[in-house]
Image: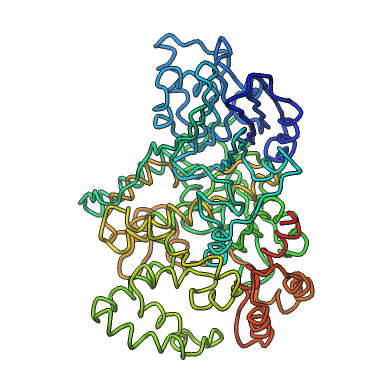
Amino acid sequence: MCGISGIFAPNRMDTMDGQIVHRMNETIVHRGPDDGGVFVGPGIGLGHRRLSIIDVAGGHQPLSNEDGTIWVLLNGEIYNYNDLRADLLARGHRFATNSDTEAIVHLYEQYGESCFERLRGMFAIALWDSNKRVLILARDRVGKKPLFYTADKENVVFGSELKVLLAADPKRKYDVDLEALSDYFSLGYVPAPKTIYRGVRKVLPGHFVVVSRDGLREKSYWTLSFGQVEQRSEDEWCEVLQHLLCDATRVRLMSEVPLGAFLSGGVDSSAVVANMSRLMNDPVVTCSIGFEEAKFDESEYARTVANLFKTNHNEQIVRANAVDIMDKLVWHYDEPFSDSSAVPTYYVSKVARERVTVALGGDGGDESLAGYRRYKLDMYENKMRSMLPYGFRRALFGPLGRWYPALSWAPRVFRGKATFQSLSRTPLEGYFNSISTFRPHEKAELLSGDMQRKLAAYDTISVLQKHYDEAGTDDPLSRIQYTDIKTYLPDDILAKVDRASMAVSLEVRAPLLDHHVIEALARMPSNLKLKNGEGKYIFKKSLEKTLPHDVLYRPKMGFAIPLARWFRKELKELAYEAIFSLNDGILNRRHVEKIWKQHQSGRVDRSPQLWSLLMYSKWKQTFKA
């Protein structure tokens, strides 16, 4: 795992200033503390920070072909590089190292732009072809590794983090993208290709961008469709899953440095550890954290799995205090990000880094296998929608959704406000309403009149609508899974893990995000993913002979922290000062005060909304936006 940076001026033929590239590179030392390198040439500068994993002695970057005409930067790992290397050697290519990075250089020589579809791994790649004066920026299929870029009339600047771009020209002022900010208040993250800054973009997962004198050209090299359903028996699907996960785990065990696993005690991480135990000769090094508050503590289940597979288990009970690490997290995330599980993700990464350099995790299972509780609720609501015409639902449930009190403190049977709001809408509108931090009706109250006028008719739901329409199926569950894989997975879940783990120089690999696994699961009928209210139905069934029943079928806890209490106690003073110091014309202060008072009363939990506001305020303060 590494960090990359660079600058390309298509129309300049003088040598790029190496000090600019060095300055950019120094902002991401945390991503690659083991080594750094810079290459400059006519109109091009490339920078690399290395976390040494494969070919520790010989994998220095930037790396070129034999005659120095093609250069490459890699952030990530290419798991099939040995197979690629063997094929390329047979075709007459000569290798100077044993690194996976060099395979990319020769693969490009052999196949040109189609080289990326041959890679199996997680990656952000910058490839410089000096003969054609072309720069190519590519990102892996699901977006495990980040890649940002900005272009003006003279330069294209790129990097693994937004702060790399800011360092290229410290005097340049980037304006906030108001649509992106509106997206943030709905989703809790900024969806690709947008960033929080106008004119700065994320390379989309499964895409590459070609930069030349002719301008920029973007192309997709991978598509995922839920439209080609394969009918197999449950036993056959169980066998397919077992084989795919075992193989995806196997290829992720390559490493010349200490390797282990995150173990939460949940289904996904436990399945990964089970496969690692079968494949490795030595006990698996497993790492987990526990919390003092029993409501948030899964350590008992992690210990159960660790004992079952006789792992070298490392557990640390932490008192996850956001006050201690908030500024650090805001700096690492670069743009507003309000998934509060970033806090425990940072802590477990820190614990793991004390013992290993590479950790396998269970990310990706919830999206592909319908593990989130919200999928179950959405299917329930869709059944109700199918029984009643849209006009009737809108007339009946619309007013109920407005008038019914929130009652977040009450038993679930009495908490119908969000359900009424969703039932009055179309399926996608209902789903968007249920996942939004600030639901559509409240966001209208949150944003100032001036902000709403600047946004005009823009609506964040359009971000989801695009993917919802491209899923290749009419199946309601598959459509929202596809939408989440294209939005929530890369821009929330994977961004969270990447930034938290890279903050402590830890590489994280996710077998369930192997593209062979994802493609197979997209072909699985949705009723085998969510069946009789049980999410990950077929996955759990495939693991019944491997994992204890209590691990497989216990209620899902998630990776949570006691936010509600923090905003009434530990975080109260800091949060109040930060949130109410905002005076940028974006927010309606009266509504912010209303949210604060509701939460402090103890009758309503508004901690997700307050965390969103706090992260926005701290981001503005940190980056002087």
Q: Is 500 rendered above or below residue 400?
A: above
279 or 465, nearer to the observer: 465
362 or 574, nearer to the observer: 574
541 or 55, nearer to the observer: 55
Q: Residue at x 50, y 10 (%)?
A: 94
Q: Residue at x 48, y 29 (%)?
A: 214
- Residue 442 is situated, as x and y percent measured from the top left of the image, at 53, 78
The image quadrant where one finds the C terminus is: bottom right
Q: In this figure, what is the number of numbered marks?
A: 0
Q: Residue at x 70, y 61 (%)?
A: 317
Can you see residue 309? Answer: yes
Q: What colouring method underlies this structural image?
A: rainbow
Q: Is 356 rendered above or below residue 411?
A: above
- Residue 12 is situated, as x and y percent measured from the top left of the image, at 63, 23
The image quadrant where one finds the N terminus is: top right
Q: Is residue 412 left or right of residue 57?
A: left
Q: Quadrant of residue 166?
A: top right
Q: Is residue 69 left or right of residue 115?
A: right
Q: Residue at x 64, y 34 (%)?
A: 5
Q: Is 579 rendered above or below residue 303?
A: below
Can you see residue 481? Answer: no
Q: Is 125 rendered above or below residue 555?
A: above
- Residue 60 is situated, as x and y percent measured from the top left of the image, at 65, 22
- Residue 364 is situated, as x and y percent measured from the top left of the image, at 46, 52
